Image: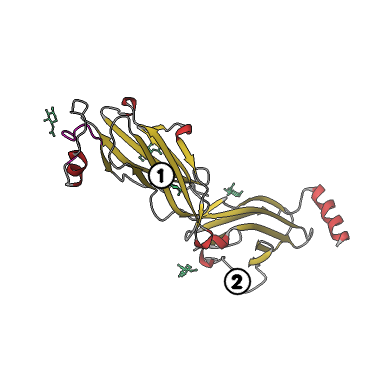
Amino acid sequence: MGEKLLLCALLANWGLSLRLENVSIPQYGIKDGGVTLGCFFDLEKDTFLVLKWYKDGHEFFRYSEQSTPFILTFPIDGVFVEITQSNMNQVVLRNISLRSSGSYRCEVSADLPSFRTLSQSGELFVTAPPRDLPHIDCHPPLIQQGDVLKCNCTSYASKPAASLMFYLNEGKANFGDMIEYLPALEPYGLETSILGLEFQVEVMHLKNGALRIKCTATIGNGYWVSNVTLYEASVNVNAQPSSPAGPNRLLSGVPRGNGSGGLLTLVVTFLLALLTHLHP
Ligand SMILES: *[C@@H]1O[C@H](CO)[C@@H](O)[C@H](O)[C@H]1NC(C)=O
Ligand SMILES: *[C@@H]1O[C@H](CO)[C@@H](O)[C@H](O)[C@H]1NC(C)=O
Ligand SMILES: *[C@@H]1O[C@H](CO)[C@@H](O)[C@H](O)[C@H]1NC(C)=O
Ligand SMILES: *[C@@H]1O[C@H](CO)[C@@H](O)[C@H](O)[C@H]1NC(C)=O
Ligand SMILES: *[C@@H]1O[C@H](CO)[C@@H](O)[C@H](O)[C@H]1NC(C)=O
């Protein structure tokens, strides 16, 4: 072993033996999706012997032109190799799960003359985006100027917990108005995030007579973003002071806009969820 290392070191100095060009392991993957692991090398004067992929120290893929078939795979929890799309330079994993997270390493060995073995590793973190859009819940359901509006934005069951942010009329809400709660633990290691918002409704919140409250959920530094507008409120600024009839009229389905007696009528509008992928 010691002599082999010494020999490798000598050959490395000659610069004519195996070199690893690049090993690419995506930082993030999405549960139930796929990832491509890349391993490029330059043999120089060496001859190729074998290429192996390991997850957390366990070999799951071997490519050798001296065996039949060239590709061998070894079962490992959370690792499904798509053999038809894999070769000596890339390994495609499909149907990844949270158990696919871990340290991946590509190891290339050369035969004559250097017998050199090189490897490089990287971490893959599999994220599980929430199944649903974040949900905004506000109290009281009907408000007028001067009321204190309390809202919660909840993003259910993701890994890691989603980072939430409130927007009022497109601007970020004041940090002082937001209340951070610890994520709640769910089955399978998933987490539910909740962010609170509490503020007094002022004229300045009513842009063109409307107030829009939005909550976004983000995972992995923007790797995954859910972009939703949930509340839209409009007010008749010329209206009479609020009357007890207001809420009943809302409940009986009067459309928002005029004639709500100075009440803000809150309308929930789901716009869209946006799923962005960074390509490896
Ligand atoms: C890695 O190297 C190969 C061969 O030089 C090249 O084709 C490939 O684009 C490289 N990949 C990355 C991610 O740099
Ligand atoms: C993915 O894995 C799940 C459970 O591990 C399994 O039920 C499902 O059939 C798999 N899908 C594919 C396309 O292999
Ligand atoms: C917001 O969520 C917190 C934590 O679950 C809860 O204590 C609080 O009552 C909720 N507030 C509203 C307005 O729903
Ligand atoms: C939300 O999505 C829309 C449409 O894709 C985009 O124009 C807008 O900038 C996004 N807003 C945020 C806060 O991501
Ligand atoms: C809203 O009120 C304005 C002025 O009071 C009136 O001109 C307009 O027709 C009303 N719109 C609706 C939808 O009732």
- Kindly identify the residue that appears in the image at 47 percent across and 49 percent down: 193
Q: Is residue 96 left or right of residue 168?
A: right
Name the amino acid, label 2: Pro
Q: Is residue 232 magenta?
A: no
Q: Residue at x 17, y 39 (%)?
A: 245
Q: Position of residue 57 (x, y in %)?
A: 69, 63
Observer-nearest of 167 and 122? 167
Read off the residue under disc 2: 75
Amino acid on which disc 1 is placed: Asn
Q: Residues within 10 Å of mark 2 (few under 14, many from 20)?
A: few
Left or right, 259 with respect to 48, comes to left
In the rendered view, tell whether residue 268 sits above or below residue 58. Answer: above
Q: Nearer the viewer, residue 23 or 31?
A: 31
Q: Find the magenta span and give its range.
A: 255-264
- Can you give x and y, in whole percent of width and height, for residue 44 in the image? 72, 53
Q: Return the residue found at the far bottom.
A: 68
Residue located at (82% from left, 55% from top) = 8
Q: Position of residue 84 (x, y in %)?
A: 51, 66
Residue 272 left/right relative to 121 = left
- The quarter holding residue 263 reads top left
Q: Compare residues 136 and 54 and report the one nearer the observer.
A: 136
Answer few, some or many: residues within 10 Å of disc 1's Cα (few below 14, many 20 plus, some between 14 and 19). Answer: many
Q: Is disc 2 placed on a helix, strand or loop?
A: loop
- Mark number, residue 242: none
Residue carrying label 1: 152
Residue toward you, 117 or 180: 180
Q: Looking at the picture, how far across and down is residue 227, in whole percent? A: 39, 43
Tally of marks: 2
Within 8 Å: ligand 3 and the Cβ of disc 1?
Answer: yes
Residue drawn at point x = 23 percent, y = 31 percent: 235
Q: Earlier in the sequence, mark 1 or mark 2?
A: 2
Image quarter where the N terminus lies is bottom right
